[in-house]
Image (cartoon, helix red, strand yellow):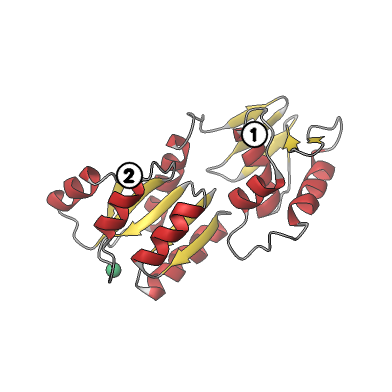
Amino acid sequence: MRVLIIEDEEALASAIARGLRREGMAVDVSLDGQGGLEKALVTAYDVVILDRNLPGLHGDDVCRRLAESGTEARILMLTAAGGLRDKVAGLNLGADDYLGKPFAFEELVARLRALSRRAGPPRPPVLRRSDVELDPASRRAWRQGRELELTNKEFGVLEALLSASGAVLSSEELLERVWDENADPFTNVVRVAVMTLRKKLGEPPLIETVAGAGYRL
Ligand code: CA
């Protein structure tokens, strides 16, 4: 799951980013509205966490422009003003959810997971295919009932492949979904993560390489 945080309070932005990375999410941060909007328009995020009070381009404008762009990303608006009027305003601008500051980190995580399930085609809380099961909320995965010990990236790759329901995902798509903007597009991190994931999944092989196209489960 890939998340963009647009928040001008640097300490808050990095605290959220750290916490979400610990949850296994790929997180990018933008400290201003204009930069955040540009990132959100070029990268396929699952959820954009958007502060409302931003210097320069206001959060409301970022929200409106994103909604108008037809992005598939879900927008979670954060604001210091926790009043009903702000909530209604945010939702009218095209936000999908709204969280007033201060908030409990656990609530933010729960809302992000709920929103990401609403992005794209509907997904069940626990993903299943063949004899593999994966629970994004508890960050656990099993094959034939045996729990898999996965790194965050291996877990992310497996989650993306399961969510694709048998469709092929290219290395670029996996890189975009599971890694953040610091990943070098020319590295072989995806190939390596798929290789170690295959080893951990064991026999019979589950992840198929589709020549010239990518991977599918
Ligand atoms: Ca702010």
* Placement of 128 over or under 136, stated as above or below: above
**Percent x, y of residue 159:** 63, 40
Q: Residue at x 41, y 53 (%)?
A: 48
Q: Nearer the viewer, residue 171 or 126?
A: 171
Is the residue indicated by label 2 positioned so its CB lies within 8 Å of ligand 1? no
Instruction: Examine the image and state in which quarter residue 162 appears.
Output: top right
Query: Farthest residue in the left direction?
Result: 85
Is the residue indicated by label 1 positioned so its CB lies within 8 Å of ligand 1? no
Q: Residue at x 80, y 53 (%)?
A: 192
Q: Which residue is mark 2?
A: 68
Q: Which residue is mark 1?
A: 162
Q: Is residue 64 left or right of residue 106?
A: left
Q: Is residue 92 visible?
A: yes
**Percent x, y of residue 217:** 73, 32
Instruction: Examine the image and state in which quarter residue 157 appears.
Output: top right
Mark toward the viewer: 1 or 2: 2
Q: Earlier in the sequence, mark 1 or mark 2?
A: 2
Q: Please, what secondary structure does the residue beneath circle 2 have?
A: helix
Disc 2 residue type? Glu
Q: Please, what secondary structure does the residue beneath circle 1 have?
A: helix
* Placement of 5 over or under 202, stated as above or below: below
**Percent x, y of residue 160:** 62, 40
Spatial CA span between label 1 and label 2: 30 Å
Quadrant observed for ligand 1 in the rendered image:
bottom left
